[in-house]
Amino acid sequence: MAEPKMKINVTKTFLPPIEEYQSQLQRAWKNEWLTNRGELVLELEANLKNHLKVSNIILMNNGTIPLQIALKLLGKNGEIITTPFSYVATTSAIVWENCTPVFVDIHPEYLTIDENKIKDAITDKTTAILATHVFGNPCHLEAIEAIAREHHLAVIYDAAHCFGVTYKGKSVFDYGTASSCSFHATKLFHTGEGGAVFCNDEQLFDKFYQSHNFGHKTALDFHGLGINGKMSELQAALGLAVLPYMTHITEGRKKAVTFYNEHLDFTLLQRMKIREFTEWNYSYYPVIFQDEAQLLKIESALVKEDVIPRRYFYPSLNNLPYCKNSPMPNSESVSSSILCLPLYADMPLTDLERIAHIVNTNLSV
Ligand SMILES: *Cc1c(COP(=O)(O)O)cnc(C)c1O
């Protein structure tokens, strides 16, 4: 019988040699310590600070909890100006924390929130801006900072896709009142499930720290309300085993991105414009078709050949059933016509050639 053909998914989780994961796990066994900020979590925090050149980080159990804590601390049940083009967690975190999302449409080429439309959405109930550096492409950081300063708003960045991204030579995690990252298995750097918050304000950093550990001050005394956002030693063990491979992962992805850039037919396709002064991380390969019909045609041609792209991000979040809808023409148009092509380190050239061929031959007819 023929071997079943392996599907090529939109991404493939990087798995380090299992012995390297096991040797990290052995440390946890030796310590007989599995969570509550043990040796491995502390070491991963130190290594990540070094790797990312950031001055602070708190590891958490996923990339959604830091958003929720940020909204709890800074959103204050108010209106949050946000992007309709992101993963659902950006919006659901706002609603879950009893704040109200107020959508502002995206820039059609950068795909990030349109900074020029933010001011019109500000009311006396606005408390914060929550914007996503979508696919690792930074928002207009300076413009957003200026608006926030003028109107006394907090800026929370959903930087889930931004591992390793720099803007003007500085980690994007260094911008805004606070930034979150996700270390989910589908993300560039991962701990299976996991995430982190970055925050340069010392007082606020302390609040994040307390909040992610039930509000504990000591075992018997509390600062205030908190939740369980702690990363475990088992997650940190995987992170410690993956981190040494980041150059390999990024270089491998860069090769695949370069191939797509050189071989896809961009007379009939649009790609995301990377913000100026950005060192990007090759986290996704989104392509924008003429319309949804063309997207559906090419998606099914790919699926027929066992290539599984993903419609990141669909639907436009203003259309979620629990949100008050206001039309967002750019976001709705991009959402209905954008597809992320498979991208990961170690993608064989033959797979890349096959994918580019299927896309190109189905574009024109
Ligand atoms: C992955 C992702 C999240 C959620 O992160 P988890 O670690 O899965 O909780 C939030 N926002 C965006 C934009 C994401 O892509």
Image (cartoon, rainbow, N blue to C red):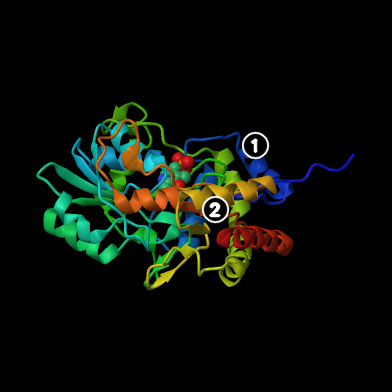
Q: Residues within 10 Å of mark 2 (few under 14, many from 20)?
A: many
- Per the image, label 1 sits on a secondary structure element best described as helix
Percent of width and height locating residue 339: 51, 52
In this picture, residue 90 sits left or right of residue 267: left
Q: Residue furthest front?
A: 365
Whether label 1 lies within 8 Å of ligand 1 gets the answer no
In this picture, residue 257 sits left or right of residue 337: right
Q: Residue furthest right?
A: 1
Please tell me whether residue 151 is drawn above or below residue 53 in the rendered image. Answer: above
Out of 271 and 149, give the one closest to the viewer. 271
- Per the image, label 2 sits on a secondary structure element best described as loop
Percent of width and height locating residue 236: 55, 44
Out of 136 and 113, give the one closest to the viewer. 113
Mark 1 against mark 2, which lies toward the viewer?
Answer: 2
For mark 1, what is the residue?
29
Percent of width and height locating residue 38: 51, 41
- Asked whether the viewer can see residue 12, the reply is no
Please tell me whether residue 25 is drawn above or below residue 158 in the rendered image. Answer: above
For mark 2, what is the residue?
189
Quadrant assignment for the C terminus: bottom right
Percent of width and height locating residue 198: 37, 52
In this picture, residue 21 sits left or right of residue 57: right
Out of 267 and 73, give the one closest to the viewer. 267
Q: Name the kind of residue labelled 1 in the image.
A: Trp
Instruction: Give the spatial CA distance, label 1 vs label 2.
Output: 24 Å
